[in-house]
Image (cartoon, grey):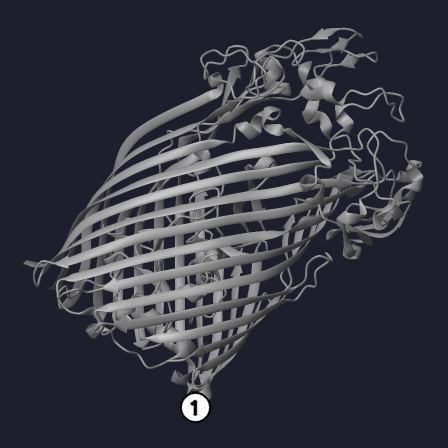
Amino acid sequence: MYSAHAFSQDTLTSNPDEDVEVIAVKGIRGSLIRAQAVKMDNTSIVEAISAEDIGKLPDSSIAESLARLPGLAGERVGGRTSGISVRGFKEDFTGTSLNGRELIGIGDNRGVEYDLYPSEIMTGATIYKTTDASLLVQGIGGTVDLQTVRPLAAQETLTLTGTLERGGNDSDNPEFDNEGHRYALSFVEKLADDTLGVALAIASTESPRNERKYGVWGYGDNNGALLPFGLDTQAISRVLERDTISGIVQWRPGDNWDIVVDVLDIDYSDSGVIRGFIEPFELDAASLSGSGANSTGTQINANPVLRTDPAQKDGELSTYGINLTYHLNDSWSVELDVADSESSKRDLRGESYAGLARNGAALAPAEARSRDFVMSPDGIVFTGSNGLGAFADPSMLQLAGPQPWGGGMASLADQFATDVQRADGETYNYINAQDGFLNFADFEEELTTARLETFGLVDWGIISKVNVGIAYSDRYKSKDNKGFFATASSYPQSEAIPEQYLYNGLADLSWAGFGQVVAYDGFAPYNDGEYTLNDAGLLEPDRLGDTFEVNEEVTTLFAKFDFETDLAGFFVTGNVGAQYVQTDQSSTGYIGIVGAKFKVCDADGDGQVDESCVQSISDDYSHFLPSLNINVEIAENQYVRFAASKTISRARIDQMKASGFVKFDQNINLIAIPNTPEAVAEYGSPWSKFQGNPTLRPLEANNFDLSFENYFKDEGYVSLALFYKDLVNWTRDGNQTIDFTNDPTNDGANYFIPGFHDRTVGADGLVGPDGTQYAPGTYLMPPDLGTFSFFEDGLEGEVKGAEFTAQIPLSMLADMLEGFGIAGSATIIDAELSDGTAIPGQSDRVYSLTAYYETGGFEVRVAATDRSEYLTYQRGGSNKIEQATRDGITQVDAQISYDFADSGIDYLKGLRVSLQGTNLTDEDEETRDGNGLVTLRREFGPSYMLNFNYNFY
């Protein structure tokens, strides 16, 4: 996509093709020189990536290249770098554009998944750490502007790229492997006496990822030892398939016109399987040896659930745009830019359960179903088992749910009522009927933008250039959260895994001590009708309460004035300007409430959402955003830069939804809490309510930056930047105690339903949480009060930081080091929100170091990045977003290559061969609790790529 403001406007009347400076240096040194020139010449504080031609960036996606830049930090998702934080702000709080136009993603929020964009279609990126009034795509963290080729300003080329990829970890699942590939074709042609340019890039990727995940349900004291409450360990295999087409046509029909039409289309699929055990943990106390975090013993009464969760994430993103520039005269031009972007995604995950028998059936004695274990601060590992051989034998393993997980189907009790007795003498019912679950969420997003502006070269005292314009954007985003309970046709009995479901081989969980387990197609029972499905949207209020639409219309007026002058003998340049931003936003969604028929928002039982559950909320507001950038050349190629601005990042989409839900915990101990405010304050309540807030204002910050930059070589500089962000508005969690029989936040709604929210004390009696004794048969009603949770504006905070960057060719130290160089950076951040919470994406320390050597076409590069612990969020239960904390991580990548351009072999002159490795130190992602015990570990292993790049001309 193209918008002319992304390119220099220094000379409005000249032909850009004639002004291109051709830098002959190639390879990594050439990239560093071009990136340094961008940084040096910009009026803002920026970082840059630059490739000599289209398709020449060395990484598999732009995300990996960005993650090595000063002040930026990558976040791995499924083993791939996908998210990028800028100065401690996650991608949702950073603006992302493609050649100056706002870019959308296929995720839950505003942030772009940078691994969606293959490096083969990119020529570089500029990261604006300070803003100006013409930069419409803004964020508190900064702006990442990705760049594709402009054909009339580029050299003609035809390039083929082929890559073979191999993961360092073999697949533990027999239906997957660890081999992948990438292919790309890129060309640029100039026609009609260089007045018509065409650029096309086509890229196709198939990339494997094999992961070992260790997890527990937390740890607690168990007879003096710290042991898990439950186990959650899987072997995960996934394959990323990505097909991308980028097409650009640029036409100059006359001296005054410049027309650019561009198209970008990305088809994206990330499929795989999550296979492993999830189960409660019970200790044989007599077997325990040791205490605290170090012990050995035996798990008994093991009744594992072998979860086979097939996953399929499919997305598509399409962008179309046209940019028209007309030069009125030698000094003034007018530009119109119009674009439309659409994306869609389905994130699907099935769950298929298998075990020793259906829940409720007779099992061997607890002691006969056991595992021996060794516990340490690194987690629990099993060394042997007894009575669990069925998990490796498909003729014995049962396609049924071994645990009583069907409580969510209480309103379908009649459907699952039987006269078949369980081992305990009761009859099978809905509690025993969940054999799987099908989870999926559909996302749709569309963004239409239009921008009309004028550029002028003027002589108004110190003012040398003017840029004034108006912009409009219309965004729509929706999420449809769906889920279905699955029950096998054998209910209330169980049957072995059908032979046609089986893969050729077993899955390997021996690395966790679980041995080999049956591998079968988890989608098969959904596809062939073996499972009966019941819509969870009518049974789970929080699922309907996460279905929504959000709309935003934004109109921006902006003006920027560039200035240059001499001040006390120093050359001073910069710009001053402002934006006036008018926003209209709205959301439509649902309040998920269990109705009279015990179904969610279906009081009349017609299977349709009741109108009373629909919520529509809108709001409008405006912002005035001034900005100032000043650059002083204090000596030759030495600059002091100062910037001040007010910026906004719009609230997260999932927090702006009108949707919400009312939940009720059926625990009788909570129902027995006395109906007084004091008792609810002390013991809690079974009631809870949550709702988004469509009236949220954008996050807002006043920013101040000061930097010193010394450019002493074409590929050498040092810089020190200090930055301060005064966060004057940030979204926070709000809580309010409300009456659930007369909800003041929902027109006095009464959520209490007789027969569903009340309870009768059983034969054993009950002692309530306050000590009250209840005799058998006592009728209990829950307290009226509970907590309403929501999002609200008003949180404040500050971010203080320093960045030191050095790019040094070592030939400065000695001639014998010609070709050697290092580039490193350190970012230190001190951030604090007024309520003590962390900023998502903020690491206190981020370091990067790249060492390289280049001579005669031969090139070696080793790069290391290190970031400390940080807060993020991820997809949680019922397809909702939840917070997560990631431990610090160090990642080492390397590349060795040879360019045959100077080899003297004519037919090889266009060939470049490289071998690349990522995560070479096999860094794991770990999360530890307050006792230093690992609660989550993800092992991805390294990845290796052999690349062939042939440039025909």
Q: Nearer the viewer, residue 523 or 485?
A: 523
Q: Is residue 237 left or right of residue 890?
A: right
> As drawn, is 452 to the left or to the right of 618?
left
For the N terminus, the image quarter is: bottom left
Classify 160 as above or below 474. below
Tell me the quadrant of the picture where the C terminus can be found.
Answer: bottom left
Looking at this view, name the residue that lies furthest to the bottom. Answer: 904
**Residue placed most toward the observer, 789 or 357:** 357
The residue lying at 62 percent from left, 43 percent from top is: 349
- Residue at (51, 58) in percent of width and height: 242
In the rendered structure, which amino acid carries the disc numbered 1? Answer: Asp
Residue bearing the label numbered 1:
906
- Give the camera-side residue of 59 and 859: 59
In this rendering, the answer to whether 438 lies above or below 645 is above
Residue 952 in percent (x, y) is at 40, 80
Residue 729 in view here:
yes
Residue 362 placed where, x, y %? Answer: 90, 32
The location of residue 617, given as percent across then percent down, is 38, 25
Q: Which residue is rendered at x = 51% and y = 16% of the image? A: 738
Q: Is residue 918 above or below residue 422?
A: below
| Residue 508 visible in the picture | no
The percent position of residue 477, horizontal first and vertical second, equals 41, 38
